[in-house]
Image (spheres, helix red, strand yellow):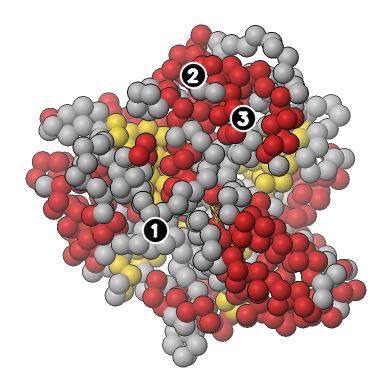
């Protein structure tokens, strides 16, 4: 346990630069791939590795790659999803900032495997500072012959560009991202057809998360089996977890999949326990879109087993008692956090970020926000609680893209596990109205 | 919503001739070349960032029409995009745009207090600009920096682990530097070298 793949070298001074990165084994996988491997062999290794998409859905990467339409004569594209806007998630920015060449290296190997000659890295516009870092790294890769025409003297050529967005969570959804890359509003497309067949400029396109692509260099170097030997069961490899909220050590951690959730929350080398010696109340382990679960259900499954940091264990119990690993945005709430207020906050987020194409999402997120505002501010009634469930239920599964589901799940799960908090808000409006919520005030009042 | 915004845009038309400098135009053409032949519209988002920064701090209709012309697309295609993304401003903003994160992870770590403190200190509310034209205050959704909460950006530069005392220092610094026209961070155009 505890092996690292991505951040092993992240503390080496100036690892951001090509020369230092190269001196520490950087770009070796590109040499190996281009000179000794056939594209299909790389895809085979990625399949064997069991690597799953790190953007949230956890779809097997090798399998996704086999869907790419190779029969059409159109150019193929690789698009790296660096939109990272899911509340609680800040791992991709960390990777791009610290190790831009690791991403570029993985993207060159991936492009070679997929027969791609043009690749884009889409970053959210708020990450303007990354645009300079990535452009500089790309320029260095060109200068050193790892990008451009006839890379390393082979007949493989690849151009790579960075494309900034301009502030819209929905552009993280892969088809909205492609629209945005084409210079349009970020309105998701109806699937099918999937991007693997009709993607960027109607051409076959693979969209992968930053962290997913950064793993490919390791898989090329050491083989799919070596990668699969790390982790636990079907959750192979490592995962970047961005931990935040009421904990002692917020930050980005690379963990080997399979460690216990309890160790991750309480061990000093990870979250370091709950801030100010308070009690743990709840966790949202995979970004704001995944179900919130109370302390008992994040530390143990409903059947009493230790909950582990794997795709399977976190999901065990389904939506009744489980949640999801999602993007790895690990949000921790202490005993003083108000679940109703947090649910209202997240609903406001989804309402604000809905692109507005489907009525269940556009209207439903607004209704949920309004009702939650009402309850949180002491104007709710008992019927509101079930009304929320009914709205969430009607949004889920009835929209073009999964943002609708992502808006419904946090509400449904908060009421499922913390119904008494909602009832309290309705029963004691005068108390609720007078609570001061800001954490700074909270700390002021402690002594 | 968008319909109203577009009406609002059209009312501002002044027919002022607008043009990027020669140096910026070179950058712009370089960016257009990142995309395949005939797909120059793809360059719209990055170029709007540059336009906003270089041509007056916000996207008025004359600027947008100029960009449409430059990219050989219809003006409405630019309006559609400018009204969709939160980083494009359709009205004049302050020299410094303070964007405070209001989303869950920041909120449980004091983000709401930070917003309240800024409103009190600058005597403006969300979306307003100070009378001296120096500061615009805006709440935004998660900035992807939740581990450093509470967080804000000023002209897309990150400020993290905020406290009232820290904010006092940051704003004082900006006030002192306000006469100096240089951005502390590089401009969008400079990020493409
Ligand atoms: C509303 C919404 C937002 C998303 N945001 C992101 C994001 O910021 N980054 C990301 O990699 N994937 C995001 N996704 C998932 C992408 O659609 C896509 O599945 C992913 O980029 C595929 O890459 P992967 O298989 O490597 O994970 C989002 C999905 C939805 C529905
Ligand atoms: S579900 Fe929401 S965000 Fe997704 S396409 Fe429909 S309206 Fe847009
Ligand atoms: S919630 Fe504030 S940066 Fe993510």
Residue A385 tag number: none
The percent position of residue A297, horizontal first and vertical second, equals: 54, 82
Question: Left or right: A88 with respect to A6?
Answer: right
Residue at left 78%, top 28%?
Answer: B134
Instruction: Identify residue for label 1.
Output: A54
**SS label for mark 1:** loop
**Marks 1 and 2, how far apart in space?**
38 Å
**Marks 3 and 1, how far apart in space?**
34 Å
Dot 3: chain letter: B
Nearer-the-camera pick, A373 or A301: A373
The image quarter in which residue B81 lies: top right
Dot 1: chain letter: A
Q: Nearer the viewer, mark 3 or mark 1?
A: 3
Dot 2: chain letter: B
Instruction: Identify residue for label 2.
Output: B72
| A274 versus A186 height, above or below | below
Mark 1 Cα within 10 Å, few/some/many (few <14, many 20+)?
many
The answer to whether any part of residue A446 appears in the image is no
- Quadrant of the frame with the N terminus of chain A: bottom left
| Disc 1 within 8 angstroms of ligand 1 (CB) | yes
Furthest-left residue in view?
Answer: A36
Do the CB atoms of the residues marked 2 and 3 lie less than 8 Å apart? no
- Ligand 2's image quarter is bottom right
The percent position of residue A423, horizontal first and vertical second, equals: 77, 80
Residue at left 51%, top 78%?
Answer: A319
Q: Nearer the viewer, mark 1 or mark 2?
A: 2
Residue B79 tag number: 3
**SS label for mark 3:** helix
The percent position of residue A266, horizontal first and vertical second, equals: 52, 74
Q: Mark 3 or mark 2, which is nearer the start of the sequence?
A: 2
């Amino acid at each position: 346990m505890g092996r690292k793949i991505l951040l092993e070298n992240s503390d080496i001074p100036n690892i951001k630069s090509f020369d230092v990165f190269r001196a520490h084994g950087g770009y070796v996988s590109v040499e190996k791939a281009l000179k000794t491997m056939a594209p299909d062999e790389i895809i085979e290794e990625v399949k064997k590795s069991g690597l799953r998409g790190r953007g949230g859905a956890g779809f097997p990467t090798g399998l996704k790659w086999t869907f790419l339409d190779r029969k059409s004569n159109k150019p193929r594209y690789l698009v790296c999803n660096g939109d990272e806007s899911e509340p609680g998630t800040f791992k991709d920015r960390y990777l791009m900032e610290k190790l831009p060449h690791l991403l570029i290296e993985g993207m060159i190997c991936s492009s070679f495997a997929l027969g791609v000659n043009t690749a884009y890295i889409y970053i959210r516009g708020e990450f303007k500072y990354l645009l300079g870092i990535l452009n500089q790294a790309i320029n260095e890769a060109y200068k050193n012959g790892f990008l451009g025409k006839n890379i390393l003297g082979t007949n493989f050529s690849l151009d790579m560009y960075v494309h900034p967005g301009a502030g819209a969570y929905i552009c993280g959804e892969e088809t909205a991202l492609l629209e945005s890359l084409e210079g349009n509003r970020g309105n998701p497309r109806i699937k099918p057809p999937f991007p693997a067949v009709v993607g960027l400029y109607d051409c076959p396109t693979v969209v992968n998360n930053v962290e997913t692509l950064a793993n490919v260099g390791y898989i090329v170097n050491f083989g799919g089996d070596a990668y699969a030997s790390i982790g636990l069961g079907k959750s192979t490899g490592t995962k970047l977890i961005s931990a935040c909220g009421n904990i002692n050590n917020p930050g980005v951690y690379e963990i080997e999949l399979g460690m216990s959730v309890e160790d991750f929350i309480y061990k000093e080398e990870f979250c370091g326990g709950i801030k100010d010696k308070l009690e743990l109340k709840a966790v949202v382990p995979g970004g704001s879109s995944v179900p919130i679960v109370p302390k008992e259900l994040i530390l143990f499954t409903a059947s009493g087993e230790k909950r582990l940091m794997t795709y399977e264990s976190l999901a065990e119990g389904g939506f009744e008692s489980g949640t999801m690993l999602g993007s790895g945005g690990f949000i921790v709430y202490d005993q003083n956090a108000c679940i109703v207020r947090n649910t209202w906050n997240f609903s406001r987020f989804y309402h604000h970020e809905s692109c507005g194409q489907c009525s269940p999402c556009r209207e439903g997120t607004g209704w949920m926000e309004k009702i939650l505002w009402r309850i949180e501010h002491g104007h709710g009634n008992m019927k509101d609680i079930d009304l929320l469930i009914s709205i969430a239920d009607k949004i889920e599964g009835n929209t073009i893209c999964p943002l609708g589901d992502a808006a419904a799940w946090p509400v449904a799960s908060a009421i499922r596990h913390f119904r008494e908090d909602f009832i309290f808000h309705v029963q004691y409006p005068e108390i609720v109205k007078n609570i001061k919520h800001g954490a700074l005030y909270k700390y002021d009042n402690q002594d | 919503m968008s319909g109203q915004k577009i009406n609002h845009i059209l009312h501002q038309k002044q027919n002022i001739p607008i043009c990027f400098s020669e140096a910026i135009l070179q950058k712009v053409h370089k960016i257009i070349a990142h995309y395949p032949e005939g797909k120059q519209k793809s360059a719209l988002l990055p170029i709007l960032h540059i336009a906003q920064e270089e041509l007056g701090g916000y996207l008025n209709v004359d600027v947008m029409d100029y960009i449409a012309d430059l990219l050989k697309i219809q003006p409405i295609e630019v309006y559609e995009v400018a009204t969709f993304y939160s980083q494009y401003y359709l009205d004049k903003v302050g020299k410094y745009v303070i964007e405070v994160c209001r989303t869950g992870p920041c909120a449980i770590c004091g983000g709401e207090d930070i917003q309240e403190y800024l409103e009190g200190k600058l005597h403006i509310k969300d979306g307003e600009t100070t009378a001296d034209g120096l500061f615009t205050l805006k709440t935004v959704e998660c900035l992807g920096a939740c581990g450093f909460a509470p967080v804000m950006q000023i002209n897309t530069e990150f400020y993290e682990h905020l406290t009232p005392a820290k904010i006092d220092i940051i704003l004082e610094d900006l006030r002192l530097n306000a006469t100096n026209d240089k951005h502390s961070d590089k401009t969008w155009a400079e990020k493409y070298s």
